[in-house]
Structures are given as structure tokens and as C-alpha cells.
């Protein structure tokens, strides 16, 4: 396969800590203080899928993320797993991006990196969970895109065979390169980096790029470039004026069944 | 030209069956169109011109149908579909476009949003028309961070306003038949960069919770039952589906494809009976469209009782056998 | 003073934590019940570079150091102490060979040990007592190019499964250390004790009957065998046991906290009862104290301090961590009430494992003797 593999990853709050996040209701931003951050779980499957392809195709794997300075850690994890080098899109101008603005920044990063034949993403993130970025990135780069992928088989240098899931089963698809693929967690088990890989990761390069380095206009990315906006936040509640039954188990069950019958629910 | 088709719905279908989420969205689109001042609802359809499908679209709320004239456009080809729908939108300028948040639908919507340079809000759990700064617009609610918060998102400057919604959030509703028309539109296939080799349709999940009229949902509290048998019996008795919350899936009682909640399916049955479900927002936000909710749990403070139409506070091993017996008696009488 | 881990150490800890979740957490209960050596799991840790974590790269190790090793043992023991304890015993021998062995011995043994292709035991204890090395009765007589070894070592970790052993025997009135390979005529292993804790590590005897060992297998200088053994037992054994104790306490504590937050009594979680809170506070304080004693000893070794110079810190971390592990486990049992002693709740295992640690790599009382000598010296 001529060209490299870019794997797009995101740093997210630790899955066990999602409940600890609080919302700044005025600004619509999330208060992440004190919540540990990790690489988005399925993004590790994406890194693993990239590395397995590299073993067959002998190209390079480049880890790419957009995020604040702390997101560097997610790139370090990808480097320890085996990525060759990393690109960190890090600029205040990127902050507050919706999926469209995120895809724009990533597309800029991909173009500026150059020579990318395949982009692999995780299917969805655990924090915002839109699952839109991969397809939007593909559209911007004018690449084909397949999401929900559970299997990737390289063919000749010009295409890949993939198995994607959908609600009613599986679809086997041949996709011509260059392309964007989004994988789900069933595709593989991400490798654990061994001790030597961990120690070697720090020697690998992480390029830190601002918006200008990625050749994107600051007004097109981040909050300024996002067509969707936060309006309001509130606590979720779905109250109903329900009736709570009292009495012995027999009495409660009798009353309940009477009511269901009356409402023609049974 | 007057904009007559204000709210559009992308129709997903397979083997002459329309996705239940698409049908539900048509109904919701009617509601939104009315709030916008009485605009029309259009279904956008590609890959088929089966009269069975078009008839059904009219009876579930479509005023008109935009139909891609090239039948060979496959719904699996998100590039061509997005190209078709974006071209159409550029010409007719709808206010709102809705999509089922399906594996394929999300891909098409995402690509179309880029083509139209507009905003797309994912996995909405509510859609409302609101007025902000004198602009009438769509507020799309999504749940955030484990479901504990509702976040309302707007797209003030760009049109159309686009949103994806999981099946089950808006239950399909039949409407009086429209006097609608089928508008055939020229559609071009994109250069084939994706070739579908094989479509493997999994055996129909007859008892899928998101399709069922009656759902019995088990939660962590089912552990006191020492097994699934009684819960399954209740579901069978009511001709319904047995699903469960995340803890009951993690515990291995319920299979993953029947997990109800934000990481699973959304449901909107006629009757939902919860067994030992405490009612975390991650669950309740996806069952709120259920017509009638009956909750059984031993903890009187469980949040599930706040959203139930009928609540029984008691131990499942005490309540469930009696409930089954009583319902059997009612059925036998009939 | 910087209390932060390096990024590498952090990544190592995360990696080991995930390994333990994947490979140990689902099986710990069954492994403990079975009580068989877990060579397959140990091989996996070797592939991750964990077995050779204090062995230099030159000899097939990964050379990440003693603090990294401490973090690893802590994380593994939090889920399943038997595996953590393997690194305690296994790495004593590796440390001794690297620090006292000839270049030939290092090349011959260390790469296979790092891969866990071979398992090594270190044997000092005899029936006359483990705490008093001068009670060693096993003899090694030099005849020509060979030492003739006679005697019996008891309660030796991994004895039933070891491929080689480092033993200390009397040469004249002094002691010397030897590497004895499995298959050497006159070297047999016997028995497997049925211990209540650390059940995936078989313990048994090493028996030497006119066992002929080539002169080249002398480890270190003749007559300096105790220094060889004690150096390894102190720097690697005692810190290792301390790490196992720390992780074991953490595992019990985590289960107790989770239970206390979930279990309701009088209409609210028992975690809101002050009696429970105080027990949790005691556990928390003790664990945090143990952790910093452990980390400090490991950091001193990483800074190049000899086991002797870091001796007091090593002694303190072993003494204190092993002291609190069983206390924490007992409190966890108390907090969990009737569930506490059901094996499926995995707290009794923590208690059983923790009480095995008292005697490992030197009893608590020997630790006190050592520290006392240092205080009044």
C-alpha cells in the first residue's frame, strides 16, 4: 500500500468517572477537573487495527489527535502501542469544536502530514458519542468511508476488504484507497505495550501543530467554526404523575392487574 | 419560491420494510412542521420505488416523497446517498432534516452535513421548536455524561438544521392519509469507490425490545429472583420482549443486543414493566416515550417510581409469582 | 522532593493494571481454589517484559528498575497476590546471578529466566529454622572440579516446579552459594505443602544426596554465600513481599469501600455510619503509609544505594506493609459482615494471602531485630 496509515484518537474522561463530570451550565462546557483522562477505549482498537495492517503492509502508523496540551498522553499511549510518530493538533483556536469543526481540524492535520493512504478512527467516543467525525473527515478529504467495522483484510495495494456491522447483520465491502475506516470494539483486542515499548515511546516524535501549521483558518475550527451551539443544560428528569400502590403483595398485585386491564394494556 | 417542505426525513429501508425509526420520525416531523407554522413534511427516499413503501410513508405522516429516480443507488453507498440528498436540499432549502441514528444513516447524515456546511446533532432524545433571539429554530436535546444531564443544542445560523434520532425515541403513529405526490428527482451515483460484496442479514430478532409492544425490563434487583425464568414467563405471557439494564447485561442475565439504555437500544412500547430497575438516567432517558410504565422494586426511594405510571414497592420473589398468576387468570377468562 | 511517577512508570502501572483486569480478575477465584502453578500466566508477563524488569537489557531484561517493579507487584497483588509473590521469589535469584555471577553464568541463565522459560528458586531455609542462617546443615565439599552437596532445604517457594535453584551450603565453617540445575544427579524436589494462602505458587523441599555440582556453578566467592543470598533477599525479596502486602491490602480495601457504599442498613448506605467510616479511614491511612515506605525503599535502590545502605528503609517497608495487610483484610471482613467470610467475595483469600507474608523473606520479628540493631548501633 503506497502511503501511511493515520489513526485518529481522542482523549476522554475515564469511563468509570463519567458520572463525576459536572457541567458549567452557563458556558455549556464540561468541568473535567480532577477526572482522570484516558485514550477513548475504541480508539485503542483503531490503533491496534492500524498496527496489524502495518505488520502486513510495511507502512508507517501516525497517531493524530486534536486536544489540549494534556491530550499528549493519549498520543504517548499510541506510541507505546507501536505507532511510529504522532501529530498533536494543539491550539486554543481548536477548543469548543463540534463534529464539523473537529473534522476540519483533523482534515487539515491529515493534509499537512501528507502521504496518508488510510485513516482509521474509533467508531464513537464515550464522552460525546456522536460517531460522526469519521464520515465528516472522509467527506472533507473526498475519501470513501466505512464505519462500524469488525474486520479488515488487506487485498492488493489499492483496496481493502472489510466487514461492517449494521442493525440487520453484516455487510462485506471492498473499499478503494485512500479511505477512512471507523472500527468498533469487536475488531480486535488492543495489545498491551510491553516494558521496552513503553520506554521507547518517549524517544518517538510528537509534532505539535497549531492551526496555522495544519493550514486551517482559525475561524473555521473550534467554537467559531462550529455550526451547532450549546443552548441550555438541565438535569434529566422524566416525571410522571404515577400511582404508587400500597398494601400486601396480594392487594398490590390485584390493584395493578385491575388497572392494566382497565387501560386495555393486557 | 416558497419553501413548502419544511421538515424532511431520510427514509431507511431494507427488503421493502421501512425502518421503524424512520416512520417515527415522520410523525415527529409533522409535529415540528406544525409548530413552524404548517409547513409540509417530505420523505426522502432512494433505492426503491415500491408502492408498498410509498403508501406507508404517506400514512405515517409524509406529505410528499422525494424519490431518487436512479433505483440502483444503494443505501449502503453513503457517498451517493449524501450527494443526492444534499443536492436536493440545496435546491429546496428545508428548515430541518431528520435521520435515523442507524449505522448507515449516521454516515449519510454526516457526509450530507459537510456538503451543506451545516450542523448535525447526534442521538437526540427530544426535538422542540423554540424561539431564541427572535429566530424560530430547532432545539435538539441530547443526553450527556451517563445520562445525568440534558443538553439542548441549536444551530442558529446554518440551514437545514439536522439531527439524528435512535429508533424507539419517537414511536410511529398513523395519520390520515395525505394527498401527497411522489416527486421524482434525478440522482447521480458517485464514482464507485465502495463495492458491496455481500449483505448478510442476521436472523430476524422477533423479540427485539425496540420493536415490541410490551417490554419487560430486568435490572440489578433481579438477582433476588435466582434466575430469569419468571421474568421470561411474564414477557411471554404478555407477548412481549424481555430486555434489561446495563447491570443485568453485565451480570450475564440478558444478552447484549437486548440492553436498554444509552449504550443499548431505546424503546417506546405500549407497556413497559420494570423488575428491580432502580432507574438511573442512563436507562430512563431511553424509555421515556413508553406509553405506560409499571415499576416493581423493593426500594421506595428508587428514582424509577418518579417516572412510573404505576408502582409496586415490594420484593420481586413475593410480587412476581402473584402477578404472573393474576395475569394468567385474566387471560384465561378471555 | 517530587512525589510524581515518571510518565513511563505511569504507563507501566496502567499496563499492568489492565493486564491484571484481563488475565487475573476473572480467574482469581478459580486459580486460588485449584492451587496449581500458573506458568502460562507468568509466561504472558514475561512477554510484556515484566519478569526481567530489574534485569539489564544486556541479559534479556528490560531494566526499568525497582520502583517500576514495586508498582507492578502492587498492581498484580491488588487482584491476585500469588502472581505478585512470584516476582518476589523469582527475581531474588535473578538479582543474585546478575550481581554476583560470572559473565558466563549471567549469559547462561538470565535470558531464559527473563522469558520465564526457566523458573528459579532461592533456598536458604532448613528444618533447623529459616531465620538463623548459621543453622544451615547442608554441606558442599569440593572434590576435584566438583562440589558434593548433601542436605535438605524446606518450605522453598517454587521448589516443585523450579528448573534451577540457588542454594546456600556450608563449605568448611563458612557458607557458599551455588546454582544447581534440575536434572543434576542427586538433586530432587519433594512434596508440595498445602498452604492456606498464595496458592498458585507451589512450595516444597529441595533434596541433595551426593549431588555433584561443577565448580563453575559456585555463585560469588567461596565463603561469601550469605552475602549473596541476603543481598538478594533484602533488595528483592523484602521489597517484593512488601509490594505484595501493599497490593493485597489495597484489594481488600477496595472491596470494602465498594461494599460499604452499596450495602444499605437503616435506610442508608453503611458507608454513612461512623463506625464503618473510621474503619475505612484506618485502612486508608495504613495503606498510604505503606505505599510511601515501599516506594521510598525502591527509589533508594534505583538511586544506586546498596541493599545494606537502603537496609533500614527496606526493613521498614517489609515490616509495616506485612503488618497492615492482614489488619486491612480483617477490617474488610468486618465491614462486609456475613458476606466477608464467603470465599466468593474474595476477602478471605486476601486474609489468607496476607498471613503468608509474615514469614516470607524474613519474619516480622527478624525485621524488628534488624531495625533495632541499626537504631542502637
Image: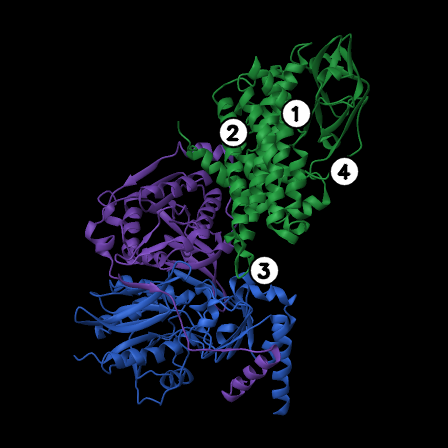
Chain colours: A purple, B blue, C green
Q: CA distance from mark 1 to mark 2?
A: 18 Å
> What residue is shown with label 2?
C293
4 and 3 marks on the same chain: no
Q: Quadrant of residue B46?
A: bottom left
Q: CA distance from mark 2 to mark 3?
A: 39 Å
SS type, badge 1: helix
SS type, badge 4: loop
- Residue C54: tell me if it is visible: yes
- Residue C97: tell me if it is visible: no
> What residue is shown with label 1?
C365
Q: CA distance from mark 4 to mark 1?
A: 24 Å
Mark 2 surroundings: few (<14), some (14-19) or many (≥20) residues within 10 A: many
2 and 3 marks on the same chain: no
Q: Position of residue B251 (x, y in %)?
A: 58, 60
> What residue is shown with label 3?
B251
Disc with the residue nearer the chain's start (1 vs 2): 2
Amino acid at each position: 500500500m503506497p502511503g501511511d496509515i493515520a489513526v485518529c484518537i481522542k482523549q476522554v474522561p475515564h469511563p468509570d468517572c463519567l458520572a463525576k463530570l459536572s457541567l458549567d451550565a452557563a458556558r455549556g462546557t464540561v468541568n473535567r477537573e480532577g477526572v482522570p483522562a484516558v485514550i477513548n477505549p475504541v480508539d485503542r482498537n483503531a490503533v491496534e487495527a492500524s498496527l496489524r495492517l502495518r505488520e502486513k503492509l510495511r507502512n508507517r502508523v501516525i497517531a493524530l489527535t486534536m486536544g489540549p496540551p494534556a491530550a499528549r498522553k493519549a498520543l504517548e499511549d499510541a506510541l507505546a502501542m507501536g505507532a511510529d510518530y504522532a501529530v498533536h493538533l494543539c491550539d486554543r483556536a481548536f477548543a469548543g469544536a463540534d463534529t464539523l469543526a473537529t473534522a476540519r481540524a483533523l482534515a487539515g492535520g491529515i493534509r499537512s502530514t501528507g502521504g496518508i493512504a488510510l485513516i482509521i478512527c474509533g467508531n464513537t467516543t464515550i464522552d460525546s458519542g456522536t460517531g460522526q467525525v469519521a464520515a465528516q473527515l472522509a467527506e472533507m478529504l473526498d475519501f470513501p468511508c466505512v464505519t462500524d467495522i469488525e474486520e479488515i483484510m488487506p487485498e492488493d495495494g489499492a483496496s481493502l476488504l472489510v466487514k461492517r456491522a449494521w442493525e440487520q447483520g453484516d455487510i462485506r465491502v471492498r473499499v478503494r484507497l485512500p479511505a477512512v475506516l471507523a472500527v468498533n470494539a469487536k475488531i480486535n483486542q488492543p495489545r498491551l505495550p510491553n516494558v521496552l515499548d513503553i520506554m521507547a515511546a518517549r524517544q518517538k516524535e510528537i509534532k505539535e501543530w497549531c492551526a496555522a501549521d495544519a493550514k486551517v483558518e482559525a475561524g473555521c475550527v473550534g467554537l467559531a467554526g462550529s455550526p451547532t451551539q450549546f443552548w441550555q443544560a438541565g438535569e434529566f428528569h422524566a416525571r410522571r404523575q404515577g400511582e404508587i400502590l400500597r398494601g400486601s403483595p396480594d392487594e398490590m398485585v390485584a390493584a395493578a392487574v385491575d388497572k392494566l386491564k382497565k387501560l386495555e394494556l393486557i | 419560491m416558497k419553501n413548502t417542505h419544511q421538515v424532511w426525513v431520510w427514509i431507511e429501508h431494507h427488503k421493502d420494510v421501512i425502518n421503524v425509526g424512520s416512520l417515527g420520525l415522520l410523525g415527529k416531523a409533522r409535529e415540528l412542521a406544525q409548530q413552524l407554522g404548517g409547513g409540509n413534511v417530505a420523505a426522502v427516499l432512494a433505492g426503491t420505488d415500491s408502492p408498498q413503501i410509498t403508501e406507508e410513508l404517506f400514512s405515517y405522516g409524509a406529505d410528499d416523497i422525494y424519490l431518487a429516480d436512479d433505483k440502483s443507488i444503494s443505501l449502503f453507498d453513503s457517498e451517493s446517498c449524501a450527494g443526492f440528498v444534499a443536492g436536493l436540499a440545496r435546491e429546496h432549502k428545508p428548515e430541518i432534516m431528520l435521520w435515523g441514528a442507524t449505522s448507515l444513516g449516521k454516515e449519510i447524515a454526516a457526509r450530507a452535513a459537510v456538503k451543506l456546511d451545516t450542523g448535525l446533532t447526534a442521538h437526540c432524545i427530544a426535538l422542540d421548536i423554540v424561539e431564541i433571539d427572535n429566530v424560530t429554530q430547532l432545539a435538539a436535546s441530547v443526553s450527556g455524561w451517563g445520562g445525568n444531564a440534558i443538553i439542548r443544542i441549536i444551530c442558529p445560523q446554518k440551514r437545514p438544521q439536522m439531527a439524528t434520532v435512535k429508533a424507539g425515541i419517537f414511536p410511529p403513529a398513523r395519520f390520515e392519509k395525505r394527498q401527497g405526490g411522489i416527486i421524482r428527482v434525478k440522482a447521480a451515483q458517485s464514482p464507485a469507490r465502495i463495492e458491496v460484496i455481500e449483505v448478510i442479514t442476521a436472523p430476524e430478532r422477533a423479540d427485539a425490545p425496540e420493536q415490541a409492544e410490551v417490554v419487560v425490563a430486568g435490572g440489578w434487583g433481579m438477582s433476588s429472583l435466582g434466575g430469569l425464568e419468571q421474568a421470561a414467563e411474564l414477557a411471554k405471557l404478555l407477548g412481549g420482549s424481555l430486555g434489561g439494564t446495563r447491570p443485568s447485561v453485565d451480570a450475564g442475565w440478558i444478552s447484549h443486543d437486548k440492553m436498554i439504555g444509552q449504550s443499548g437500544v431505546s424503546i417506546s412500547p405500549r407497556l413497559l414493566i420494570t423488575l428491580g430497575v432502580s432507574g438511573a438516567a442512563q436507562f430512563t432517558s431511553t424509555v421515556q416515550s413508553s406509553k405506560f410504565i409499571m415499576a416493581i422494586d423493593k426500594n421506595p426511594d428508587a428514582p424509577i417510581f418518579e417516572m412510573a405510571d404505576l408502582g409496586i414497592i415490594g420484593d420481586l420473589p413475593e410480587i412476581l409469582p402473584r402477578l404472573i398468576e393474576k395475569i394468567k387468570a385474566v387471560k384465561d377468562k378471555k | 522532593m517530587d512525589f510524581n511517577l515518571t510518565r513511563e512508570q505511569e504507563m507501566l502501572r496502567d499496563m499492568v493494571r489492565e493486564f491484571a483486569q484481563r488475565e487475573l480478575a476473572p480467574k482469581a477465584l478459580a486459580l486460588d481454589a485449584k492451587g496449581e502453578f500458573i506458568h502460562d500466566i507468568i509466561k504472558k508477563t514475561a512477554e510484556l517484559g515484566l519478569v526481567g524488569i530489574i534485569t539489564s537489557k544486556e541479559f534479556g531484561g528490560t531494566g526499568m528498575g525497582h520502583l517500576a517493579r514495586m508498582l507492578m507487584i502492587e498492581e498484580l497483588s491488588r487482584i491476585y497476590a500469588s502472581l505478585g509473590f512470584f516476582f518476589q521469589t523469582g527475581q531474588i535469584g535473578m538479582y543474585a546471578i546478575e550481581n554476583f555471577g560470572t559473565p558466563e553464568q549471567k549469559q547462561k541463565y538470565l535470558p531464559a529466566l527473563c522469558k520465564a522459560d526457566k523458573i528459579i528458586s532461592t533456598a536458604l531455609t532448613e528444618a533447623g529454622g529459616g531465620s538463623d542462617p548459621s543453622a544451615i546443615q547442608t554441606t558442599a565439599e569440593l572434590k576435584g572440579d566438583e562440589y558434593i552437596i548433601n542436605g535438605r532445604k524446606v518450605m522453598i517457594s517454587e521448589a516443585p516446579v523450579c528448573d534451577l535453584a540457588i542454594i546456600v551450603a556450608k563449605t568448611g565453617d563458612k557458607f557458599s552459594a551455588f546454582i544447581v540445575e534440575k536434572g543434576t544427579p542427586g538433586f530432587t524436589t519433594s512434596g508440595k505443602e498445602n498452604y492456606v494462602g498464595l496458592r498458585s505458587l507451589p512450595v516444597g523441599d529441595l533434596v541433595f544426596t551426593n549431588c555433584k555440582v561443577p565448580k563453575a556453578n559456585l555463585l560469588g566467592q567461596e565463603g561469601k554465600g550469605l552475602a549473596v543470598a541476603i543481598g538478594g533477599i533484602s533488595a528483592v525479596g523484602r521489597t517484593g513481599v512488601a509490594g505484595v502486602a501493599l497490593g493485597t491490602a489495597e484489594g481488600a480495601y477496595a472491596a470494602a469501600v465498594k461494599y460499604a457504599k452499596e450495602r444499605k442498613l437503616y435506610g442508608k448506605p453503611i458507608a454513612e455510619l461512623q463506625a464503618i467510616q473510621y474503619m475505612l479511614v484506618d485502612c486508608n491511612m495504613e495503606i498510604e503509609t505503606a505505599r510511601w515506605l515501599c516506594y521510598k525503599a525502591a527509589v533508594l535502590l534505583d538511586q544506586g544505594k546498596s541493599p545494606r545502605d537502603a537496609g533500614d528503609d527496606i526493613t521498614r517497608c517489609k515490616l509495616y506493609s506485612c503488618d497492615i495487610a492482614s489488619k486491612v483484610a480483617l477490617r474488610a471482613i468486618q465491614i462486609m459482615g456475613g458476606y466477608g467470610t464467603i470465599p466468593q467475595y474474595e476477602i478471605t483469600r486476601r486474609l489468607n494471602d496476607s498471613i503468608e507474608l509474615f514469614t516470607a523473606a524474613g519474619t516480622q520479628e527478624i525485621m524488628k531485630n534488624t531495625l533495632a540493631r541499626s537504631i542502637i548501633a
